[in-house]
Amino acid sequence: MKLNFIKPVYAHCDAPCGIYETNTMMYAAATCTRMIEKINELGQFDNVEKQANFCRYVAIKEQSAQKVKDELYLLWSDYFKPEHLENHPDLHDIFWQAAKQAGKVKQTVNVAECQKLTEQIQNIAHIFNSTKK
Amino acid sequence: MKLNFIKPVYAHCDAPCGIYETNTMMYAAATCTRMIEKINELGQFDNVEKQANFCRYVAIKEQSAQKVKDELYLLWSDYFKPEHLENHPDLHDIFWQAAKQAGKVKQTVNVAECQKLTEQIQNIAHIFNSTKK
Amino acid sequence: MKLNFIKPVYAHCDAPCGIYETNTMMYAAATCTRMIEKINELGQFDNVEKQANFCRYVAIKEQSAQKVKDELYLLWSDYFKPEHLENHPDLHDIFWQAAKQAGKVKQTVNVAECQKLTEQIQNIAHIFNSTKK
Amino acid sequence: MKLNFIKPVYAHCDAPCGIYETNTMMYAAATCTRMIEKINELGQFDNVEKQANFCRYVAIKEQSAQKVKDELYLLWSDYFKPEHLENHPDLHDIFWQAAKQAGKVKQTVNVAECQKLTEQIQNIAHIFNSTKK
Amino acid sequence: MKLNFIKPVYAHCDAPCGIYETNTMMYAAATCTRMIEKINELGQFDNVEKQANFCRYVAIKEQSAQKVKDELYLLWSDYFKPEHLENHPDLHDIFWQAAKQAGKVKQTVNVAECQKLTEQIQNIAHIFNSTKK
Amino acid sequence: MKLNFIKPVYAHCDAPCGIYETNTMMYAAATCTRMIEKINELGQFDNVEKQANFCRYVAIKEQSAQKVKDELYLLWSDYFKPEHLENHPDLHDIFWQAAKQAGKVKQTVNVAECQKLTEQIQNIAHIFNSTKK
């Protein structure tokens, strides 16, 4: 799996003035993917230890998908300003779809859904990066 | 202060199928207002107890404003579906502005900012309610 | 499922002076009920996705039952004052039984236990409401 | 400051079957006391570092007082059973008063209020211990 | 199961000056053991209630093992000072091994792993106690 | 302020097999620095809004310094293995000193203390990176 990193930036925020970046959501999405891979590697749940670890992987996936959502919400509502909407008129929809996709990752055990989420995050990281130039 | 309540509704969600409502965010916004009133009632911070309670009220306001944001995000990304956007094309912007206003409530000690947030929430409650008919 | 709502009230609290209400615990109890319904709708756990969602529903039920407990504790110890005990001499026992019932909801997967909890909360909401007149 | 320790006990609980003890609430109450002592040791808030640490001590006191409440609620609703009420008919009121006192510790900066809370906890620890014989 | 208790001590900490003790981590390790015992008592997962409680016990074990880790980290980095290392040159390694063992307890459903963790905690409690003389 | 980023790596962990990286602790340390800068920019606390924001910045600094500690602990106990100690015999001490320095950042309002923490994290990031070759 390849992860792309984009440098964080200072910007007005709730503090105001926190530090915005898109790496944290990318790590969280990568953890979702990894948990599904781990679930698939378990194969048959033929002993109590496998069953217990299955529960644990599902819980970690849930928390990580929620972390993706939290990071998306923060960046969307705190970093982006009305002037950014001019260059990115579909910004709201991009974040809305990504947040919905993170919800989908919670409900499924499917690497393809994680892959779709990762691509949406990469697109958001690209937009975010373009606003800093 | 008058609080308007709207009945919750079953809808598809991350579970999927949680229970959506707008009262929780209204309570949280009301708590922000109340904390600012309490701060104003302190008057001069002329003893350590008043100073300590000032810190406490600020912290409760911060948590409550964050709760407003969390509830806004949840309703926006989990409850609302593409078909709702047809009747409410400015839905994204309404939630974005409300989330930004909750951030403003964090940064200020001003009842007028809470009042503005409360009105935005009432509007959202109205839209939410209209989708259930 | 029918949910009854009762208007919140200002009252002395830890802040002091928060906003008390019984709707939040009612939503949380409703979520417990809904999670058990979802578990029952799963039928046979014949694929990994159903098994994962089973874990998720159990976890959401657990959190929601704890939320009921937290809301019960808060209302009991912060809102109610010695004078209320005069009109409601069994108040302590009513809250104790409801908190124990919320624990029962954690340990079981039985809609009847949720129903019993919901009725206890409705009784508490009724008492709470009567103190505000 | 003297802290009394009482051995934990297995008992039916939400799990069911957790481990009950009264030491955790005693530590949390001791932390409240210590924070107030630290506040008093600050003297004049004549520099930004003292002011910042004042805020920190208030926040730690708040969290610790809430921890006392959480531990009280847990012991009251999960450990104690109807048969305990026969020997301790005022059990509910003892926990209610202690929870209210923990709220008082949040609102004040007064070692005497912490001392009162500590004595209430010691009484509860004594009752708890007596039920295990 | 036998639990050993050691009296807490005042010491410099992040506040600075909290209250250090090793009982909390001992309770948390005991809860891990108890959860594995409960899992073993379930026997066959032949109904939905047993399956749900299995998930709950696994989740409580996970949280309790994390609590052990958090308490270990706090004691290691906040309580112990360079002068303690002179008498306990292997202190870092003792905490590192215990934290790793708590991770092992998360990943397994084996009372022997909990027993090993408990012994490591008892050793740490012994060292901690020796520093207070 | 310049932030250095190092690519994350798959490694055995509590799951087991999470995703380790040092960027999250670097962001958290950067937030501590930023909060102290914001505090210094406030100048005189001559109105209630400045006083409220002072409390908020202190609280955000506290949380961010704790986040640094949590990330340090996780990397130290979960990622690093006995074989790493051969090449880095002072690894334990490096993490111990960094965790202590994060505690120092909590207790002070001094950019120099954040700078020292940042340098320690950069050193850790360097070591972490060297283990992945």
Image (spheres, coloured by chain):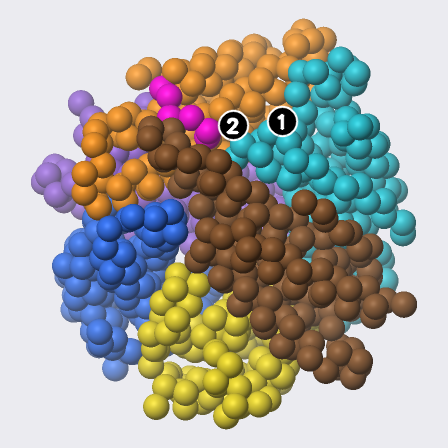
Chain colours: A blue, B purple, C orange, D cyan, E brown, F yellow
Q: Which amino acid does label 1 sit on?
A: Ser
Badge 2 density bin: few <14, some 14–19, many ≥20, Cα 10 Å: many
Q: Which amino acid does label 2 sit on?
A: Gly
Q: Do the residues labelled 1 and 2 touch (CB within 8 Å)?
A: yes
The circle on residue D77 is: 1
Q: How many marks?
A: 2
Q: Which residue is drawn at 69% across and 76% down?
A: E91
Is residue D93 visible to the viewer in this orientation of the structure? Answer: no
Name the residue that disc number 2 marks: C103
In the visual, does B61 lie left or right of A92?
right
Residue at far bottom of view: F87
Q: Does the magenta stretch include residue C109?
A: yes
In the visual, does E72 lie left or right of D100?
left
The reply to whether label 1 and label 2 mark residues of one chain is no
Between F120 and C8, the one nearer to me in the picture: F120
The circle on residue C128 is: none
Q: Quadrant of the C terminus of chain F?
A: bottom left
Q: Does the magenta stretch include residue E122?
A: no
Between F26 and E118, the one nearer to me in the picture: E118
Residue B49 position in % (x across, y down):
77, 48
Residue E105 against residue D10 in the figure, above or below? below
Residue E58 against residue F28 in the figure, above or below? above
Q: Is mark 1 on a helix, strand or loop?
A: helix
Q: Which chain carries label 2?
A: C
| Magenta extent | C106-111
Q: Which residue is drawn at 55% across and 55% down?
A: E112
Residue at far top of view: C87
Between A77 and A119, the one nearer to me in the picture: A119
